[in-house]
Image (cartoon, rainbow, N blue to C red):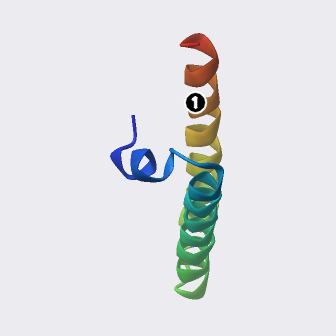
Amino acid sequence: MNPLARIFGNSTPGLATNFAGETVGVIGLGYLFHRTGHHKLERITSLLNISASGAAVAYGFIHR
């Protein structure tokens, strides 16, 4: 359903690149929030990423 992930979803190296990019983005955003003193946003960023990943896995299992 994610149009950006759809570009990389045709191969295993593409999926690994997508997941690595997502991880770098979440860690980078969390670090930016940490450096600017927004510690609640830092934690929320990780929680939202975990929630979105869990929802994607659940959607995949439901729609097999």
Q: Quadrant of the C terminus?
A: top right
Q: Secondary structure at mark 1?
A: helix
Relative vertical location of residue 24 with respect to residue 2 in this rendering, above or below: below
Dot 1 alpha-carbon crowd within 10 angstroms: few under 14, some 14 to 19, many 20 or more: few
Q: Residue at the far left: name it.
A: 3
Residue 35: quarter of image: bottom right
Relative vertical location of residue 19 with respect to residue 2 in this rendering, above or below: below
Residue 51 drawn at (x, y percent): 60, 39
Residue sitting at x 63%, y 71%: 27
Relative vertical location of residue 22 with respect to residue 51 in this rendering, above or below: below
All told, the count of numbered labels is 1
Residue 47 drawn at (x, y percent): 63, 49
Residue sitting at x 41%, y 44%: 6
Residue identified by numbered label 1: 55
Q: Quadrant of the N terminus?
A: top left
Residue 55 drawn at (x, y percent): 57, 30
Q: Is residue 1 left or right of residue 31?
A: left
Q: Amino acid at mark 1?
A: Ala
Q: Is residue 8 left or right of residue 60?
A: left
Q: Residue at the far front: name it.
A: 11
Residue 22 drawn at (x, y percent): 56, 61
Q: Residue at the far bottom: name it.
A: 35
Residue 25: quarter of image: bottom right
Q: Nearer the viewer, residue 63 or 56?
A: 63
Residue sitting at x 40%, y 51%: 7
Relative vertical location of residue 2 with respect to residue 45 in this rendering, above or below: above
Residue sitting at x 55%, y 22%: 59
Q: Nearer the viewer, residue 11 or 38?
A: 11
Q: Nearer the viewer, residue 21 or 14?
A: 14
